[in-house]
Image (tube, rainbow, N blue to C red):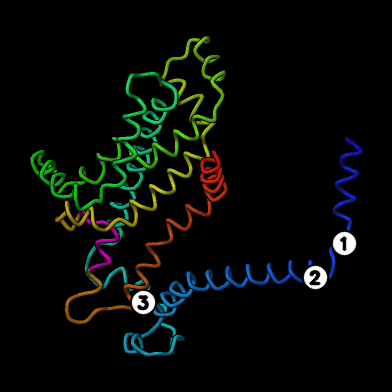
Amino acid sequence: MRGLFGKRFAAEAIPLSGTRSWRRIGGLFVIYTVLAVGSLLYILPLVWMFLTSLKPSYQVSSPDWLPDPFEWSNYPRSFTYTGLDFGKLYLNSFVITILNVVGTMVSSTFVAYGFARLRAPGKNLLFIVLLATMMIPFPVTMVPTFALFNFLGWIDTLLPVIVPAFFGNAFNIFLLRQFLMTIPIEFEEAARIDGANTPQIIFRIMMPLILPAEAAVAVLTFQNTWNDYLTPQIYIRDQSLYTVAQGIRFLRGSINPQWELMMAAALLAMLPVVILYLLAQRFFIEGITLTGIK
């Protein structure tokens, strides 16, 4: 071992020749330049949104980026301008999002465990069919799904935007299955010898072991549900059941759009997603990375 490490350190100690060193520096310069330009392209729209949210209404169409004066009052005004109760809209969004996260995590974990561990004839064929459903665009299923919920009498309630989450999601099932297949079977066998049944194994053994993947599923589901505008717009007509995304639409108006208020409300609506991502960033990246590698 000492000889091996000695050779390694000796190899690292050999200085690069002048040509190789300049090539390496040039390669790093190109990589960092591309990354900086790409980052700038992503950040600029957010900077423009923030600066526009601080402009007076008569400066919104101005080519100048900096507001003069800074209208910090746009943020509280965005809550009261439409007459909608934005506190109620935030509460609706939180209820819908939290129930979607819980439903997706539980149902997707159970289905993923079945595909990863249980034996059944045609299991692989069913898994291929499940993956194929990801190729079906939402407009194709929109009309029959609406007809089904209308038949059930769920239109203009929160049920159509909550209940489907408790039936799993193809991408999340795939993500969790890949992670579950990396867990040694000995953990499960030891739990069964101790008398644990399948739900106990899933909740008490598997879910703690696949916490990074569960965190990735939770963050992705939270983001998709919180930002979803189309699905609530299809099924919900009662303004007391509106979500934040639906409420922001009313700031646009039909005659005099309040762009500065829309930008302020949109930035405030982004905060829960940003906070959640910052809190779960380590688990989220670990879950995506490990699953991708396997």
Q: Main secondary structure of the magenta part?
A: helix
Q: Residue at point 38% right, 28% down?
A: 110
- Which-is-in-front pick, marks 3 and 1? 1
The disc at residue 291 is none
Mark-to-mark CA distance, 3 and 1: 59 Å
Task: Please state the extent of the stretch shown in magenta in the rendering.
Answer: 241-249
Q: Determine whether the residue tagged by mark 3 lies in a helix, strand or loop.
A: helix
Mark-to-mark CA distance, 1 and 2: 12 Å
Would you call the spot at circle 2 few (<14 residues within 10 Å), some (14-19), or many (20 or more)?
Answer: few
- Which-is-in-front pick, marks 1 and 2? 2
Residue 61, quarter of the rendered image: bottom left
Q: Which residue is the site of mark 1?
A: 15
Q: Which residue is the site of mark 3?
A: 74
Q: Which residue is the site of mark 2?
A: 19
The x and y percentages for residue 158 are: 21, 46
Q: Amino acid at mark 2?
A: Thr
Is 136 part of what is drawn in magenta?
Answer: no
Relative vertical location of residue 169 with respect to residue 231 in this rendering, above or below: above
Label 2 vs 3, first from the N-terminus: 2
Please name whichever residue, 92 or 18, is drawn nearer the observer in this view of the structure: 18
The quadrant in which the N terminus is found is top right
Q: Amino acid at mark 3?
A: Asn
Mark-to-mark CA distance, 2 and 3: 57 Å
Q: Residue at point 26% right, 56% down?
A: 243
Q: Amino acid at mark 1?
A: Pro
The x and y percentages for residue 101 are: 37, 42
CB atoms at circles 2 and 3 under 8 Å apart? Answer: no
The x and y percentages for residue 112 are: 40, 31
Q: Determine whether the residue tagged by mark 1 lies in a helix, strand or loop.
A: loop
Q: Residue at point 48% right, 56% down?
A: 275
